[in-house]
Amino acid sequence: MPILYSQPDSGNCYKPRLLMAKLGMSFRHVTVSALDGSTRTPDYLAKNPNGKVPLLELDDGRFLAESNAILLHLAEGTRFLPSDAYARALAYQWLFFEQYSHEPYIAVRRALMVYPERAKEATPERLAATLEGGDKALGVMEAQLQKTPYLAGEEISIADIALYAYTHEAERGGFDLRRCPAVSAWLGRVAADPGHVPLGWLPE
Ligand SMILES: N[C@@H](CCC(=O)N[C@@H](CS)C(=O)NCC(=O)O)C(=O)O
């Protein structure tokens, strides 16, 4: 059975947990957290030299880091990864967008506002810059979701799993989703897709 090393309240870690739940895949969960130093132990750094979660350990003992790479691997051959080359590339487009134009603003602002350990980093300048960047990312998603029900087109894909993770937490970072009705409706569609689990869900 694959093992997922992850932090329960992290959106990046929620992505593979959510996909595996929707796929009905069994996996073992090992809690590793940036907050208690367990991502910095020699044992963990031997598994992932970048010292971050999530990390997937495959049945054969190989490791895979980076949430969106894990999504790509898990989704191979499933309804979450289109087989057509262009449709697939569109899903990749949103995965890269998530890492460069969305997560650094929306996830970071949430972390600054939610974790007391991060509060000292929440300067007015940083809060303003992350608000501006996050609102821009939400605007890009809103424009797409006014045209198609899911980010990469007519069907749900890993693009939606990747972007759901921190978008559904955006209000905890001070973003106003009432300004993005298509994004709000899409959040509801992703949550209504079979097998959905909430952020803190862990397998038994
Ligand atoms: N690009 C990475 C980011 C992973 C990441 O930043 N994870 C955080 C938790 S959300 C972490 O492990 N932080 C620990 C640290 O930086 O020490 C991914 O998508 O997996």
Image (spheres, grey):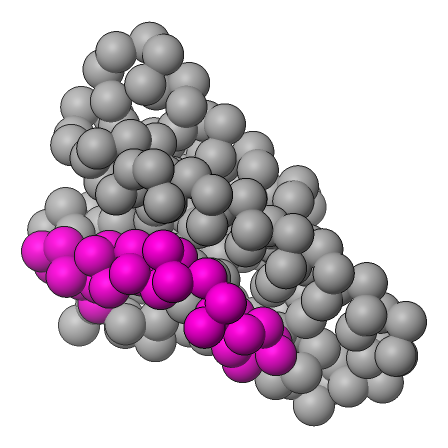
* Residue 30 figure quarter: bottom left
- At which x and y percent is residue 57? 38, 43
Looking at the image, residue 104 lies above or below residue 61: below
* Residue 83 figure quarter: top left
Along the viewing direction, whichever of 181 and 41 lies nearer the viewer: 181
Q: Does 102 appear in magenta?
A: no
Q: Does 189 appear in magenta?
A: yes
Span shown in magenta: 169-197
* Residue 17 figure quarter: bottom left
Looking at the image, residue 178 lies above or below residue 58: below
What quarter of the picture does the C terminus occupy? bottom left
Along the viewing direction, whichever of 85 and 171 lies nearer the viewer: 171
Looking at the image, residue 73 lies above or below residue 122: above
The residue sitting at 70% across, 90% down in the picture is: 116
Residue 201 in view, yes or no: yes
- At which x and y percent is residue 34? 63, 69
In the rendered structure, the answer to whether residue 139 lies left or right of residue 5 reads right
In the rendered structure, the answer to whether residue 47 lies left or right of residue 49 reads left
The residue sitting at 24% across, 64% down in the picture is: 188
The residue sitting at 26% across, 49% down in the picture is: 19
Q: Which secondary structure class fits the magenta region best?
A: helix
In the rendered structure, the answer to whether residue 48 lies left or right of residue 161 reads right
In the rendered structure, the answer to whether residue 102 lies left or right of residue 63 reads right
Extreme residue toward the top, this view: 85
Query: What is the count of numbered marks?
Result: 0
- At which x and y percent is residue 51? 65, 53
Residue 27 in view, yes or no: no
Extreme residue toward the bottom, this view: 116
The residue sitting at 56% across, 33% down in the picture is: 96
- At which x and y percent is residue 109? 68, 70
Along the viewing direction, whichever of 144 and 131 lies nearer the viewer: 144
